[in-house]
Amino acid sequence: MTTVIDTSLTDRCERYRRIFHLPATVDDAARHIVLEVGQQFGAVTMPADLGERVLRQLTQSGLVTPVVHHPRARRWTFITGPSCSAGVSTSVAAELFRLYTTVACTGSHVVLPSAEDERTGYRIWVQTPDHLDAVVPMAAVVEAARLSAVPPAPSR
């Protein structure tokens, strides 16, 4: 896990924009740095234990994408490419629902770690946004979640 050192929300937000090319903004009312889900980025949020398996599977496939961890809620959010226009089918949405996994809707926001979040452990990066020129397609994260939820076959 990499920690980016700076002091203010504005400094951190500017760093996300300049270095990681994330179109982040500061929500002054909530005092958060947010990334809007839409044409450039999507997000998939799931329980941390499933997230660990998904990240492992993506990494084994050579796929890297930013992941935010919210320890108190025990949830991981994968920042992905945008969702396809058709979205997720009803059957896949039902499967994800059973896995406590959600696909963020266009116009929603992902809260990114601030310096204060990282200092207190409230919200931290599991995987920093180092490679945003090639974010993982949302479908790859959804498929990895579905596959990672399947219990392994018993050994003989």
Image: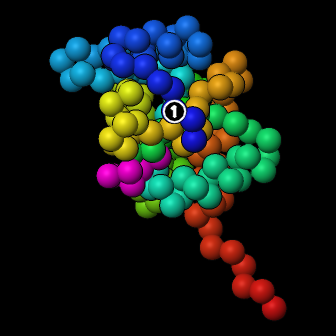
Q: Residues within 10 Å of mark 1 (few under 14, many from 20)?
A: some
Q: Main secondary structure of the magenta part?
A: loop
Answer above or below: position of 48 versus 35: below
Which residue has dot 1 on it? 3
Residue at 51% from the left image edge and 33% from the top image edge: 3
Answer above or below: position of 27 versus 95: above
- Of the residues shown, which amino acid type is indicated by label 1? Thr
Secondary element at tag 1: loop
> Where in the figure is residue 87, as x and y percent of width and height?
52, 33
Protein image colouring: rainbow
Magenta stretch bounds: 71-76
- The quadrant in which the C terminus is found is bottom right
Q: In the figure, is residue 152 to the left or right of 111?
A: right
> Where in the figure is residue 154, as x and y percent of width and height?
72, 85
> Where in the figure is residue 97, as x and y percent of width and height?
42, 55
Residue at 45% from the left image edge and 9% from the top image edge: 14
Q: In the figure, is residue 90 to the left or right of 111?
A: right
Residue sitting farthest toward the bottom: 156
> Where in the figure is residue 44, as x and y percent of width and height?
50, 40
Residue at 59% from the left image edge and 27% from the top image edge: 129
Answer above or below: position of 131 versus 21: below
Residue at 53% from the left image edge and 58% from the top image edge: 50
> Can the viewer see residue 16?
yes
> Can the viewer see residue 103?
no
Which of the 4 image quarters holds residue 137? top right
The front one of 152 and 34 is 34
Q: In the figure, is residue 10 to the left or right of 125?
A: left
Q: In the figure, is residue 2 to the left or right of 48?
A: right
